[in-house]
Amino acid sequence: MVTRPSPARATPVDVAAFRRILKRQLREREALIGELDPRAAPHLDVVAWSTTQSSRRVIAQITRALARIGTGTFGTGTGCFEPIATERLAVVPHAELCVSCQGRAEQAP
Ligand SMILES: [Zn+2]
């Protein structure tokens, strides 16, 4: 996989490292869902239920992030196509939006 640094990014993102992190997080989320699934229903265990719901959303985000690694667009915001700060990716490797776009998305009604 060739890293394609965006012109505005000083150092290219280590996509191989992020792929490992994302795949590990994917396995962890899947294991968590498998563990909680038997009781993950609102009338049985609301915490298990909401945890599996949010984990499924994160798995979808991780899957899309892995796809972006495949297409060479990982680390680029899907909203503005500007680089996502490396510091943000370190905290949220599956981030799809840069901080500015995320802020706007959260303020949208
Ligand atoms: Zn953006």
Image (spheres, grey):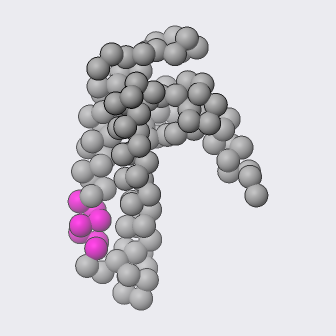
The x, y position of residue 71, in whole percent, is 39, 28
Q: Is residue 38 above or below residue 75?
A: below
Q: Residue 61, relative to residue 15: is it above or below?
A: below
Judge left or right: residue 31 versus residue 7: left
Could you say where residue 51 lies in the image, as x and y percent from the top left? 40, 67
Q: Specify start and end residues of the magenta stretch as a single range.
A: 31-37
- Residue nearer the viewer, 76 or 29: 76
Q: Position of residue 7 (x, y in %)?
A: 55, 11
Which quadrant would the C terminus be assigned to in this image?
Answer: bottom right
Instruction: Tell me if residue 5 comes above or below residue 109 in the rendering.
Output: above
The answer, for residue 84, to whether it is visible in the render is no
Residue, far front: 71
Residue at 58% of width from left, 14% of height from top?
Answer: 8
**Viewer-side residue, 107 vs 70:** 70
Tell me which corner region of the image, top left, top right, bottom left or bottom right, holds residue 37.
bottom left
Residue drawn at (30%, 37%) of the image:
21
Identified at 59% across, 27% down, the residue is 81
Question: Is residue 109 on the magenta stretch?
Answer: no
Which residue shows up at 27% across the image and 58% down it?
30
Examine the residues drawn in magenta and state their main secondary structure.
Answer: helix
Q: Position of residue 44 (x, y in %)?
A: 36, 87
Q: Nearer the viewer, residue 96 or 42?
A: 96
Q: State which quadrant residue 20 falls in.
A: top left
Question: In the picture provided, is 90 more to the left or to the right than 38?
Answer: right
Residue 31 visible, this angle = yes
Question: Quick check: 11 above or below 92?
Answer: above
